[in-house]
Each structure stands twice: as structure tokens, then as C-alpha cells.
Amino acid sequence: LLQETKSAYRNGDSKRAFDLASEAYLDNYEFVEAPLGKLDRELMEKIEIDMRVTLRNMIQNEESPDKVDTHIDMILAD
């Protein structure tokens, strides 16, 4: 979903990108959050903020597609 978010945002569809980013967080990350927190609480909190807050704010604030791509790549690398 995050790759789809990148594509949608790069294609100028901010609403779809926001919806996909929200879906990636709510429908996917939420299910691995607790198990990840048991293994690495700091990483769990970092990814949560990066996905739930920062990424969606970047899309809403119309940051450049390059910045959004870089942020998503960082999330995926974590």
C-alpha cells in the first residue's frame, strides 16, 4: 500500500494517497504493532508516528513528491 501511496501522490492524487496511507496504517500496521512493540518498543513508536502522523501530514501539506517518496522509503527500510 505504501508503494501505491507513492504512485498516487506522484500522479497528483493527494486524496487517494492520503486514503492509501491511512489504510496502510489502520488495516496493516495496527495488526503488527503490538508484537513489534514487544520486540522493539522504540521502533514500534517510530514507525507509528512516521505512518500515522508524519506521512499523512506531508500529504495534506502538499510536500514535494520526492520528500514523500523519501519518507516512505525510510518507513519501508525500518
Image (cartoon, rainbow, N blue to C red):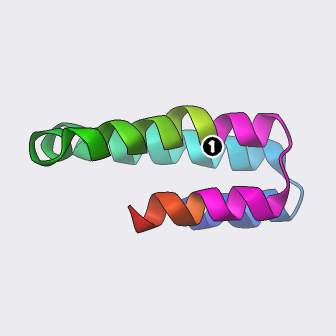
Please give left or right for residue 14 compared with residue 42 in the image.
right
Q: Which kind of residue does numbered mark 1 sit on? A: Leu
Please give left or right for residue 17 compared with residue 65 in the image.
left
Q: Nearer the viewer, residue 57 or 10?
A: 57
Q: Quick one: which residue is furthest to the right in this view?
A: 12
Q: Nearer the viewer, residue 4 or 42?
A: 42
- The stretch drawn in magenta includes residue 76: no
Q: Where does residue 17 sit, x and y in percent of width and height?
A: 71, 50
Q: Where does residue 70 sit, x and y in percent of width and height?
A: 65, 64
Residue at 48 percent across and 48 percent down: it is: 24
Q: Where does residue 22 sit, x and y in percent of width and height?
A: 56, 39
Q: Nearer the viewer, residue 55 or 9?
A: 55
Question: Where 10 sits versus 58, above or below?
Answer: below
Residue holding disc 1: 55
- Quadrant in which residue 10 is drawn: bottom right
Please give left or right for residue 70 compared with residue 24 in the image.
right
Q: Residues within 10 Å of mark 1 (few under 14, many from 20)?
A: many
Please give left or right for residue 11 compared with residue 35 in the image.
right
Q: Nearer the viewer, residue 67 or 35?
A: 67
- The stretch drawn in magenta includes residue 63: yes
Q: Which residues are magenta?
A: 55-71
User: Secondary structure of the magenta portion, mostly?
Assistant: helix
Per the image, label 1 sits on a secondary structure element best described as helix
Residue at 61 percent across and 48 percent down: it is: 20
Q: Where does residue 7 sit, x and y in percent of width and height?
A: 73, 67
Residue at 11 percent across and 48 percent down: it is: 39
